[in-house]
């Protein structure tokens, strides 16, 4: 698989992880600042309470793994 050995894969993963974390932090600030949690949101309540925290944990685990390094040389 030639794409698996692509040298820019770690850089691209770092960029997507940083942008993703920044987007999530911006969304949390907007949700708390606008007090969106006080409104009847319907299904969006599940996104705010379940999906967003799962995304944060996933991003943190990916960044932790990237910072630690893979230990495998291509």
Image: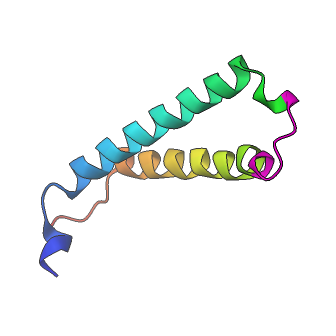
Residue 40 percent across, percent down from the top left: 87, 38
The residue drawn where x is 40% and y is 45% is 17
Residue 20 percent across, percent down from the top left: 44, 42
The residue drawn where x is 74% and y is 48% is 44
- Is residue 11 left or right of 50 when viewed as pictured? left
Residue 57 percent across, percent down from the top left: 60, 48
The residue drawn where x is 54% and y is 27% is 26
Q: Quadrant of the N terminus?
A: bottom left
| Magenta run includes residue 39 | yes
65 lies above or below 48: below
2 lies above or below 65: below
| Magenta run includes residue 42 | yes
Q: Quadrant of the C terminus?
A: bottom left
Camera-nearest residue between 60 and 53 = 53
The quarter of the picture where residue 4 lies is bottom left
Q: Tell me which segment is drawn in magenta.
A: 38-46
Camera-nearest residue between 31 and 39 = 39
37 lies above or below 53: above
The residue drawn where x is 16% and y is 72% is 3
- Is residue 63 left or right of 55 when viewed as pictured? left
Camera-nearest residue between 3 and 23 = 23
């Amino acid at each position: 698989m030639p794409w698996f050995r692509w040298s820019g894969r770690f850089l691209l993963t770092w960029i997507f992880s940083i942008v993703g974390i920044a987007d999530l932090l911006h969304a949390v600030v907007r949700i708390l600042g606008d007090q969106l949690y006080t409104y009847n949101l319907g299904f969006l309540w599940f996104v705010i309470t379940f999906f967003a925290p799962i995304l944060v944990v996933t991003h943190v685990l990916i960044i932790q793994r990237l910072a630690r390094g893979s230990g495998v040389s291509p």
